[in-house]
Image (cartoon, grey):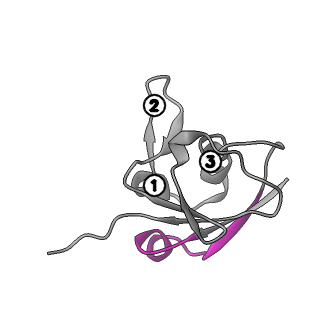
């Protein structure tokens, strides 16, 4: 299935691209999408978007807002993605 991932905020600033289209297995979750994303995204983006789980697999940081088809989702719930979904990733803003 085809998923479009858009980078927002600092993720967009660090990457040379605004979005990437990924082809993943039917019924993949956001966490299952992350390894595919890392192979297609610029170096350094993984540092602000991802962390390693206990089994060393990359997963989306809890602080990163995930928005699927204009609705905020919790990637840890293992919601399954559908063909044609648009997923936007927004790392936390810093400042003070």
Q: Nearer the viewer, residue 43 or 87?
A: 87
The mark tally for this picture is 3
Describe the element under mark 1 as helix, strand or loop.
helix
Question: Between tags 1 and 3, which lies in front?
Answer: 3
Q: Position of residue 83 (x, y in %)?
A: 83, 57
Q: Which mark is residue 78?
A: none
Which residue is pictured at 37% across the width and 54% down the height?
A: 63
Question: Between tags 3 and 2, which lies in front?
Answer: 3
Side of 40 where 83 appears, left or right:
right
Residue occupied by mark 3: 30
Describe the element under mark 3 as helix, strand or loop.
helix
Q: Which mark is residue 49?
A: 1
Asked if the residues shown at circle 1 and circle 2 are in contact, with their CB atoms under 8 angstroms apart, the answer is no
Check disc 3: other Cα within 10 Å, few if <14, some if 14-19, many if 20+: many
Residue 49, compared with residue 28, is above or below; it is below
Q: Position of residue 58 (x, y in %)?
A: 52, 39
Side of 81 where 79 appears, left or right:
left
Task: State the quadrant of the C terminus.
Answer: bottom left
Label 3, label 2: how far apart the Cα atoms are: 14 Å
Label 1, label 3: how far apart the Cα atoms are: 12 Å
Label 1, label 2: how far apart the Cα atoms are: 13 Å
Q: Position of residue 51 (x, y in %)?
A: 42, 42
Residue occupied by mark 2: 53
Q: Position of residue 22 (x, y in %)?
A: 75, 57
């Amino acid at each position: 299935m085809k998923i479009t991932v858009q980078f927002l905020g600092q993720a967009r600033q660090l990457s040379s691209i605004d979005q990437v289209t990924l082809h993943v297995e039917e019924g993949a979750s956001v966490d299952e999408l992350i390894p595919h994303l890392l192979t297609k995204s610029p170096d350094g983006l993984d540092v602000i978007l991802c962390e390693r789980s206990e089994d060393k697999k990359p997963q989306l940081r809890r602080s990163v807002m995930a928005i699927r088809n204009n609705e905020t989702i919790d990637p840890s719930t293992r919601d399954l993605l559908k063909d044609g979904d648009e997923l936007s990733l927004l790392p936390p803003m810093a400042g003070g």
